Amino acid sequence: MRGWAKLLAVSLFAAWPSAAWCAGTLEIAPTTLDLTPGKAGLLYLANNGPAAAVIQLQTLDWTQNENANVLAPSETLIASPPFLRIAPGQRQIVRVLADEPGKHESEYRLLISELPNGADAGASVSVLLQFSVPVFAARAPAPPAPEWSAKAHDGKLDLMLRNGGASALKISAISLASKPIPCGLTYVLPGARHVWTVPSDNAASLHIAARDERSGTALDADIPVQR
């Protein structure tokens, strides 16, 4: 099981992995769920505060369009219970199940919201804190299949990574010719692509060094620069 993580105040449509972490009284573990379809995974929530915590869980299908995450209510990911109240100093378990028997990986987000004390499930109330947990469901791991390309324009370079594999890629660091470029923590879902725009040095080709944090596989490549 992965380590405990402090709950963040996160915007639903922000780039969640790179958001600023805030002190809070709610803790969750793990911060990512890898499920086998039809078999429940466990999520632990602990309340370290002096008052009861009211928690709502929403299951979302996760796709991507260019560099944007697209979320929609899921009919195949189930969190039970979807609404709970955790007493001070107590810990509760949520069971998460993906019932889709597809051959390839399915990607979801589990949105955990802390509501004001006394709120009811589904009520239109302000959200105190939110955390978005990546959830992946697959019968077997699939090898990464990165497809890199680069295009120079107007003194800049668009570095594109398309995921040609069947599992999401998780990128935390990229370097070009041994120089790191800012990339934060980025997921690239199967069939999707992500573009980083960096200054161009007019090189005819590039050596890219990167790593898929999920599989531990190097995604290094040497590619030409399109002009």
Image: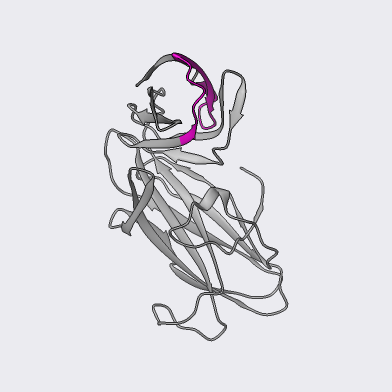
Residue drawn where x is 54% and y is 38% of the image:
183
Residue drawn where x is 51% and y is 68% of the image:
113
Q: Quadrant of the N terminus?
A: top right
Residue 55 drawn in magenta:
no
Q: Residue 9's x, y, as percent?
A: 58, 64
Q: Pick the residue in front: 172 or 99.
A: 172
Q: Residue 80's x, y, as percent?
A: 43, 63
Residue drawn where x is 47% and y is 20% of the image:
202
Figure coloring: one colour
Left or right of 195 on screen, residue 16:
right
Q: Pick the residue in front: 167 or 219.
A: 219
Identify the magenta region.
197-218
Q: Would you place residue 148 above or below residue 125 in this image? A: above
Q: Would you place residue 53 above or below residue 221 in this image? A: below
Residue drawn where x is 61% and y is 19% of the image:
178
Q: Would you place residue 72 above or below residue 115 in this image? A: above
Left or right of 34 on screen, residue 108:
left
Q: Quadrant of the C terminus?
A: top left
In the image, farthest residue toward the front: 154
Q: Pick the residue in front: 202 or 46.
A: 202
Residue 198 drawn in magenta:
yes
Q: Pick the residue in front: 139 or 109.
A: 109
Q: Residue 135's x, y, as percent?
A: 44, 47
Left or right of 20 on screen, residue 137:
left
Q: Quadrant of residue 193?
A: top left
